Amino acid sequence: MDSNVDISSLPLIHTELGVLPGIAMILVALFLGVVPTYQLYDKFNKGDLQPIHFLFLLFSVIGIVLFFSGLHHITRKTILYIDSTTVKMDVNSIYGHKTWSVPLKEYKGVLFHSRRETGSSTNKSTPYTLYILELHHENPDKQIQLYSSRSDSKLREVWENYCRKLNLPPLEKSDNEIVIRQFGNLD
């Protein structure tokens, strides 16, 4: 899945809602939590409860954790605000409100890196490379993903655009080090 923070003009306000992952987590939670809990309850009522049946409790606990995590995702709203001097993140969910603000000059640049993605054990999709641009900060909690795509066809153009709009240098990971690049040398 490709994602892109539109930075055509500053200030920018980008909003993300976490509904789809939350719905999926709640559906899995209901399956993992309700079915084993019902079976445990049924065995208990019939007087046929064996020690091995307490393994059903493990699935019930996993279901409860997934349910509340899904609830967090469904109710989460993230607002990113960037202007010529400030980066601000505002995250609201059922579990509370977090906000932080950092001067734009504290960001080291726009970092390019790629990551090889493979399918999970249940999803046997074809492996692919994900190309990512992020607003890079020394504190990983303050890093902001600006762009991700499975294609690198317009990556240089997008990378240069983010750097120009934010007035930050292009950065690249090389041998686990971050290297500052020149605009003319982004290939």
Image (cartoon, helix red, strand yellow):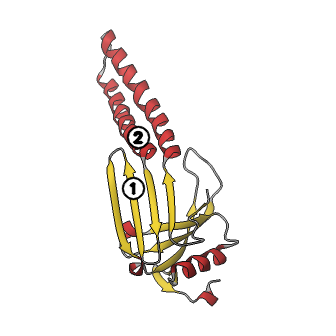
- Image coordinates of residue 91 in percent, x first then y, are 39, 55
- Say what secondary structure mark 1 lies in: strand
Q: Residue at x 44, y 31 (%)?
A: 30
Q: Earlier in the sequence, mark 2 or mark 1?
A: 2
The percent coordinates of residue 172 (x first, y second) are 52, 80
Question: Amino acid type of disc 2?
Answer: Leu
Q: Tell me the residue that label 1 is attached to.
A: 91
Q: Tell me how many marks there are.
A: 2
- Indicate whether 175 appears above or below 77: below
Residue that badge 2 annotates: 71
Q: Is 159 on the left-hand or right-hand side of 145? A: right
Rate crowding at label 2 as few (under 14), some (14 to 19) or many (20 or more) other CA atoms within 10 Å: many
Quadrant of res 158: bottom right
Q: Quadrant of the N terminus?
A: bottom right
Determine the residue positioned at 42% across, 44% down. Answer: 75
Q: Quadrant of residue 177?
A: bottom left
Tag 1: Cα neighbours inside 10 Å, few (<14), some, or many (≥20)? some
Q: Is there a contact, CB below 8 Å, between mark 2 and mark 1?
A: no
Decide: is 48 above or below 154: above
Q: 122 left or right of 65?
A: right
Callout 1, which amino acid? Answer: Val
Disc 2 element: helix
